[in-house]
Image (cartoon, grey):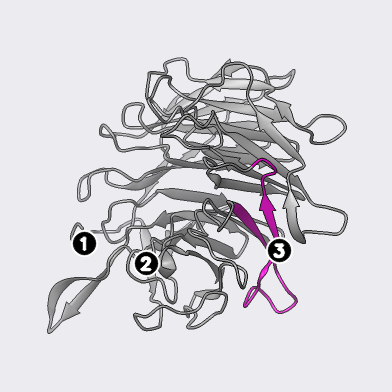
Amino acid sequence: MQNLRLIAFFLFSFVSVLAAGSDKSSPLLQNNSPTQGVAAQLAELGFPSGQFGYYVGTSVAIGADVIVSGTPYGGSTPAAFVYLKSTKGWNNVQPSAILIPSDAGNCEYFGRSIAISGDTIVVGDSEDQFGPCGPGAAYVYVKPAGGWSGKLKETAKLTVVSDSASFDGLGTSVAISANTIVVGAPGEYPYSDPGAAYVFVEPAGGWISTTETAKLTASDGNLGDGLGTSVSISNQTIVAGAPQHGAGTAYVFVQPANGWASMTQTAELTSLPGTPHDGMGTSVAIDGDTLVAGAPYGPVGANPESAAYVFTKPANGWQNMAEKANLIAPVTQAGFGLAVAIDGNRIAVGAPYFSAPLFRGGYFRGSAFPSEGAVYVFTKKVGGQNAVIVMHGSDARNLSVLGSSVAISGDVVVGGAPRLGPDRGAVFVFGLQ
């Protein structure tokens, strides 16, 4: 564990909202000691009553009054949980639906990634990257006529036929916008290719099991770049991260006039100055003309360090460029940027290795709760400084790694803490005020 140190934070005003509660495990599915202040903890969501599993919060997504979370080890079979906001809010909400794959086997990593758009949820299943279990897949769930309820199997399964092979890691990342789904395949092990992102366009009659519409690759890709480790889509623009390409790279693909077709990037985004293995592109998110890419492996205390880089679309369209701004934590830490999300003028950044410093008798005594994790939200302010808020889970303690996944929609922020429990995991819901 690396010691924390205070750094000058001249771009942002910082408001720290500390979580209440004692260092003991609290039951899931209830709101014990909500964070107070400008960002209040609204709820803590976990497994449904009577079901046991691991790592809920590995992935999270949020829609209109819907939160979805993947748990790759959800008891007897991997699953994803759908939570619906009640008339009383998010507090004490139980999963209303459990999403499962129809062909679950021993190698699935179903729920490693997740995304939602309208009434459609897509769940990534990268299979087992260390065994001969296949290239992976993505599963599509369309909201039934009766709503999100009960145990549901997929509407469609998305696979690749053009060049799929074991260890591709297809489903490591997923994203969806309207009728277009993008699925990352970084080629995790043994790094036999540079990785890719695959585009699936909904057929005219609705989602059915199908193969890719297009394959997106990098013109300068190298073996082991990990392209597709992260993906995001907004309207006709897709971004895919390649964290092992130099200091890390985010590739932008803009849909051609005639629709999606196999292509190389429209633009290549890099950090300045950037150092080898920063891992930029480990996480990416795009909303309209603004894109954010996380670089969680930058040297702590160096310049740059672990950060999230912001890029804005130039007037004449996306082009090769460096960042417009870089977001850093007010307290130096490794892992900042492992997960990112964006909605309008707000960017959420996960910091799962955050450890609150412990002071006793006026002296620094190490960390109170190693890797309890945190979620930061940066708000862009016109004509003034940006503002940043840090949120902690009320009972996220040792090794909870809150911020391993993040999502944001309007005033609601979601952060996954997959090792809380221990290892049962939880999803924390925060409201911005």
Query: What's the residue at 37%, 80% (across, down)?
Result: 24
Q: Mark 2 to mark 1: distance in Å?
A: 16 Å
Discs 1, 3 touching: Cβ within 8 Å: no
In the image, which disc is placed on residue 4? 1
Across and down, in percent, residue 78 comes to: 58, 51
Quarter of the image containing the C terminus? bottom right
For mark 2, what is the residue? 14
In the image, which disc is placed on residue 432? none
Across and down, in percent, residue 183 comes to: 59, 33
Q: Magenta segment range?
A: 79-103
Query: What's the residue at 29%, 65% (across, down)?
Result: 355
Q: Earlier in the sequence, mark 2 or mark 1?
A: 1
**Is 338 above or below relative to 275?**
below
* Residue 287 seen in render: no
Relative depth, front residue between 160 and 367: 160
Mark 2 residue type: Phe
Q: Dot 2: what SS? A: strand
